[in-house]
Image (tube, rainbow, N blue to C red):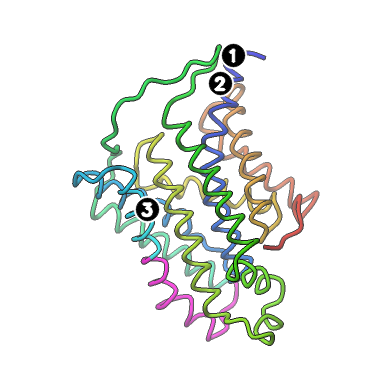
Amino acid sequence: MDPQLLQLFVNGIAISSIIALGAVGLTLTYGILRLSNFAHGDFMTLGAYITLLANTLGINIWIAMVIGAIATIGAALFSEKIIWAPMRTRRATSATLIIISIGLALFIRNGIILFWGGNNQRYKLPVEEALQLGPVRLPFYSLVVVGLAIVTIFGLHYLLQNTKIGKAMRAVADDLDLARVTGIRVDRVILWTWIIAAGLTALGGSMLGLVEAVRPNMGWFLILPMFAAVILGGIGNPYGAIAGAFVIGIAQEVSTYWLRTEYKLAVALVIMILVLLLKPQGLFKGTV
């Protein structure tokens, strides 16, 4: 294989790990809350910027990432309290919810620009030498990103399969009314859905800041690949979203071997359209 093509494939694994965490959060909010949240990418950006703020104040980057996740979870729960819960009470239509989520995305992004400005910024990180593996160069922080993603994904798997809240989330995703009748506390499931989704999304944003510059539109540019991953893997299926994320992320990076970098998003869009045309249910069954 051409060394350049192999390098792009390896680079795609790192960005796919970030897309995977965001896509899992996105598919959980749809599978359980029936919400297509276009503000999801901007919550990712918010997590990255709060991590940046904490890191700028001299806090260790790993602790700063935890602070970023906690603060983003708080913001997501606040939006649930003042926006999404009242909208569910009023039985708002899907179109209404999408429009509100786009408005929320714009609000978050412009708030970030107002507070931090529009320039690219970077974390205060020690310089680490890249690992050379044959013709492939493996940047240290890309390896960290992949490692964090693997640990997080296994943690999510354990939570969904072996804990009461995970089983309750799967039950609510399958049939909300039946879950309520059987005594499952749906409000508690909704709370945990936001905590998990926002936490994963913030972690993904902080991880993106490890390998790229932190900028106000970083999450917005990932929202299309995240939706494409969710659709490819089967809407509502977190494992499918992870698989879809790796297909989308690697395809985007490898495509730059033949296409200009500006067309990476178009690759995700084409894959999403093809899936919708050929297999609308996705590669896997859409369930948590």
Q: Amino acid at mark 1?
A: Pro
For the residues labelled 3 and 2, say whether their Cβ atoms are less than 8 Å apart.
Answer: no
Q: Which region of the structure is painted magenta?
A: 74-94
Tell me: residue 67, above or below residue 34.
Answer: above
State the residue position of label 3. 47
Report, in whole angstroms, how far the alpha carbon at label 3 lies from the one at label 1: 35 Å
Q: Residue at x 46, y 31 (%)?
A: 142
Q: Quarter of the image containing the C terminus? A: bottom right
Give the farthest residue toward the left.
Answer: 57
Of labels 3 and 1, earlier in sequence is: 1
Q: Position of residue 92 (x, y in %)?
A: 56, 80
Q: Amino acid at mark 3?
A: Gly
Tell me: residue 233, above or below residue 213.
Answer: below
Report, in whole angstroms, how far the alpha carbon at label 2 lies from the one at label 1: 6 Å
Q: Position of residue 22 (x, y in %)?
A: 52, 51
State the residue position of label 1. 3
Residue 281 in which image quadrant: bottom right
Q: Is residue 89 magenta?
A: yes
Q: Residue at x 77, y 51 (%)?
A: 277
Q: Residue at x 23, y 54 (%)?
A: 115
The foreground one among 181 and 88 is: 181
For the residues labelled 2 and 1, say whether their Cβ atoms are less than 8 Å apart.
Answer: yes
Tell me: residue 128, above or below residue 89.
Answer: above
Say what secondary structure mark 2 lies in: helix
Q: Position of residue 21 (x, y in %)?
A: 53, 49
Q: Residue at x 55, y 74 (%)?
A: 189
Q: Is residue 184 magenta?
A: no
State the residue position of label 2. 7
Say what secondary structure mark 1 lies in: helix
On screen, residue 269 versus residue 82, left or right, reads right
Of labels 3 and 2, earlier in sequence is: 2
Q: Quarter of the image containing the N terminus? A: top right
